[in-house]
Image (cartoon, rainbow, N blue to C red):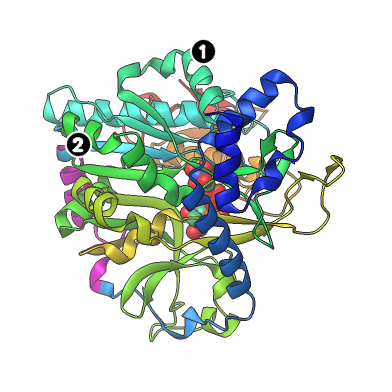
Amino acid sequence: MSLEEVRARLEAAGQTHLLRFWPELPEDEGRAFLAELSALDPDELREHCRRAVEAANGRSGSGDRPDLRMEPVPPEFIGSVRKSDQSTLNAWEDEGFLQISENKVAVLLLAGGQGTRLGVSYPKGMYKVGLPSGKTLYQIQAERIHKVQALAERRHGSKCTVPWYIMTSEFTLAPTERFFKEHKFFGLDPSNVVMFEQRMIPAVTFDGKVILEKKGKIAMAPDGNGGLYQALTDNKVLEDMEKRGVEYLHVYCVDNILVKMADPVFIGFCVKKGADCGAKVVEKAYPAEPVGVVCRVDGVYQVVEYSDIQPETTELRGPEGDLLYSAGNICNHFFTLDFLKDVAQNFKTQLKQHVALKKVPFVDQEGNQVKPTKPNGIKMEKFVFDVFQFSRKFVAFEVLREAEFSPLKNADGAPLDTPTSARRSLLALHYRWALAAGAVFLNEQGDAVAPELSVVKDVEPPHVCEISPLVSYFGEGLEPSLKDKAFKSPLILE
Ligand SMILES: CC(=O)N[C@H]1[C@@H](OP(=O)(O)OP(=O)(O)OC[C@H]2O[C@@H](n3ccc(=O)[nH]c3=O)[C@H](O)[C@@H]2O)O[C@H](CO)[C@@H](O)[C@@H]1O
């Protein structure tokens, strides 16, 4: 597209300021910038800027109190690992393994985020939390896929595949691809690892102008993890799933070191309930814990972010004394392919736009680079769980936090959700598995040490024990190598 054409389109969108520094740009930067601008549809851009300002204005003082209209998920739509007997759990697991063995289950990783809070410049999945094995989050996830396939194969006697779909963004696609190639896809068949990219959208000032990050670059950000539904359409991912015969999808976020890939128990529960959409939850640790709550508002399912709930609502308790709103969202979702098709065709444009006011670096009128000290820009994001409202049969599944949820959000030094807490949670889980399998731990002097059964994630476990996912997926199959055997720290099972 020529400069004149681009200028005319920007004029139609009220954004000609973007070309202010055009004459100063070196030729190659100018060409790249023109390509970036040509990709913006003028009508969509105008509408995006208008909506951003409207949303930012509506944000302050709208007085909306979703917490006054909330109700908990009815008990008949919740499954619980904690409250179910072993035979029920086994029946769900059997169902899940059956579906996996028939190649009907895929996993989908949301990995387009920038990991700003963790403060690394590369994708979070490449992060090492300091395990003895030095494994990254991506490697742990890949090995769990290997193992869940192997377990399904062993039960049903036929080879099967759990395809791995990975949603990336402009920030994460190239480094993620490179990383997977360097590591030979961790032994997975590359044709079963499908990476695709979500859209980016411009950040906008409070008066509706797209922000110039550099003289020849717009400030762009991924459109939120709810950009998934647009990205599935843009990249024909649903067609790929259909071709492979996938019917059920486990969607999860990159930073939970304990994530159970294609969890057979969760899949089996959702399938047996006939659900089209489901969410794993953990019981909130305390009323004010900053996690979204899965509930109903005005009769439809949704996640209400903690910032939208007043303290008195978070404190409410049910007849048994449990917190009324205790279903903490852990960004682990179940969808049927049919539901995703329905969303892609009929609902994806209706997803709520969430607005965040952020400090966005920019160039000022004189061309100086500025790092603002207070928010100057509006970023719009869609959230993956905002499709719950379109579900015909929604279920929630409560799992044990210590076995399934320990997210990596912040750098060490923060009180919560750090590399240290993630590493400790995984090692503590593996220590408990080893004890359950009959392992005996010895101290430095070689004396047996009494087991500590109540290891929690906030302290270093008493013995270092790391078990490769290739050896065990959820603690199964460890007796032959551990029962009645004595070990000094560290115990590494590869
Ligand atoms: C919107 C959402 O799901 N919120 C959940 C998310 O919060 P939280 O605020 O932690 O969400 P993040 O921003 O970390 O994003 C979650 C996941 O989405 C991915 N991502 C994010 C933005 C984007 O444009 N593209 C993209 O793929 C990230 O890479 C990550 O894997 O996890 C918490 C548990 O850990 C839950 O309690 C929150 O309810």
Q: Is mark 2 within 8 Å of ligand 1?
A: no
Q: Is 5 situated left or right of 167 in this image?
A: right
Q: Which mark is residue 349?
A: none
Please provide percent x and percent y for residue 37: 58, 37
Foreground: 224 or 364? 364
Q: Amino acid at mark 2?
A: Val
In the rendered structure, the answer to whether residue 281 lies left or right of residue 309 reads: left
Query: Measured from the top left, where is residue 224 in percent x and y?
Result: 50, 50
- Dot 2 lies on which element? loop
Question: Label 1's element?
Answer: helix
Relative placement, left or right, of 44 versus 424 is left
Where's residue 12, x and y in %?
55, 51
Q: Is residue 437 magenta?
A: no
Q: Residue at x 70, y 33 (%)?
A: 216
Instruction: Give the main secondary structure, helix, strand or loop, of the magenta stretch.
Output: helix
Q: Which residue is under mark 2?
A: 246
Q: Circle 2: is it few (<14), some (14-19), or many (20+) Cα within 10 Å?
A: many
Residue found at x 35% / y 17%: 190
Q: Identify which amino acid the numbered label 1 is placed on.
A: Glu
Residue sitting at x 32%, y 73% = 300
433, 105: nearer the viewer: 105
Which residue is label 1 attached to? Answer: 182
Residue 6 rendering spot, x and y as whole percentages: 57, 37
In this orientation, does residue 309 appear?
Answer: yes
| Magenta highlight on residue 91 | yes
Pointer 1 local density, CA inside 10 Å: few below 14, some 14–19, many at least 20: few
Whichever of callouts 2 and 1 sits on the residue coming sooner in the sequence is 1
Q: How many marks?
A: 2
Q: Which residues are magenta?
A: 76-98
